[in-house]
Amino acid sequence: MTLKKILAAVAAVAATLSLGAAQAAYPEKPITMIVPFAAGGPTDTVARTIGQVMSKSLGQQVIIENVGGAGGTIGVQRAVSAQPDGYTMLLMHIGISTAPSLYRTLKYDATKDLEPIGLVTEVPMTFVAKKDFPPKDFKEMVAYVKANKAKVSLANAGIGSASHLCGMLFMSTIETDLLTVPYKGTGPAMTDLMGGQVDLMCDQTTNTTAQIKGDKIKAYAVTSKTPVASLPNLPTADAAGLKGFNVGVWHGIWTPKGTPKAINDRIQKALQDALKDKDVIERFAGLGTAPEPANRQTPEALRAQLASEIAKWAPIIKKAGVYAD
Ligand code: ASP
């Protein structure tokens, strides 16, 4: 072996050892969890609920960073471009699988540019309206929006958000186009709905439950296949007349591509700890949702979910003919 080769070998061993030491000490500082929507909304609520317990498990604070806009794609882009050192993770939902079909100019490929950690929860949605919206039940609401389509506004969190997806499916199912109003998240959209500036929204139970129970908005139906235990008075949209209407908002956690496996494993362990925590389970139940089963809290399950959902939504979105730049 030449001296040059020996020195190169020594340097490689040293680099491996120091990487190993860095991983062993991980985490040494707070970790950022990117939420690609505004604060105070449903994704933010899921992030803050699990973030607290993940902090305990990791021994470092998990700091939520809200990066809203463009249906979540700006926040995902931020996570893709972050250092793969274990100090950035992303919490995103179903929108990560619809964006490739909706956005012509997406600069990332979520199947390649991110490392899947695991699925978190699948949240049902609810059809809600401003308090003085005239229709009394779901059937009446459908008839009303059909008859008054020129003046009914439908809020969403931007193209590719869950509320946009649900609204799009709703409008195509009832064959009626409404005026859609995009926000950086359904947190701010909810403020406007309560204020009566916008009429209608399809939004996750993690954002609507408190307002429904507080009688601040009107609620018509849930989008799950079966009723939601914490909202017993609401029928499913399917039972109320929209046969087969079903949207569940699955959420996952990713890290930037290249994050070392040992670190991803550590983050997954923190996720698993959070999803079996009694307080998290209780809080989720109160918000109409539940942790994903343990076998879905895995990289393999999230990788498969993302691939199958991209394939599922592509033809539906193509048929709807909705695009964004
Ligand atoms: N998840 C979004 C939010 O947190 C809402 C949506 O996707 O509709 O605001």
Image: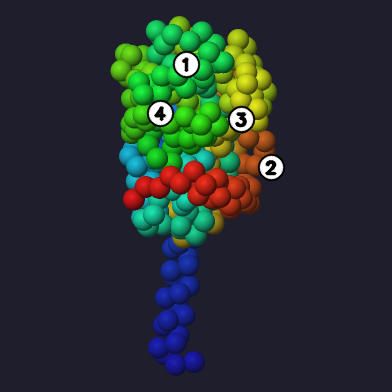
Which amino acid lies under the numbered mark 2 shown in the image of this protein? Asn
Q: Mark 2 points at which residue?
A: 295
The residue at the point 46 percent across, 57 percent down is 109
Sequence order check: which comes first, mark 1 or mark 2? 1
Residue 174 in sight here:
yes
Q: Is mark 2 on a helix, strand or loop?
A: helix
Q: Does the residue labelled 4 lie within 8 Å of ligand 1?
A: no
Q: Name the residue under label 1.
A: 144
Q: Is mark 3 within 8 Å of ligand 1?
A: no
Sequence order check: which comes first, mark 4 or mark 3? 4
Q: Residues within 10 Å of mark 4 (few under 14, many from 20)?
A: many
Q: Name the residue under label 3.
A: 245
Q: Residues within 10 Å of mark 1 (few under 14, many from 20)?
A: some
The residue at the point 67 percent across, 38 percent down is 294
Measure how far apart labels 4 and 3 are at the Cα level.
Answer: 18 Å
Q: Is mark 4 on a helix, strand or loop?
A: loop
Residue 200 lies in quadrant: top left
Q: What element carries label 3?
A: loop
- Check whether the beta carbons of the residues at disc 4 and disc 3 lie within 8 A of each other: no
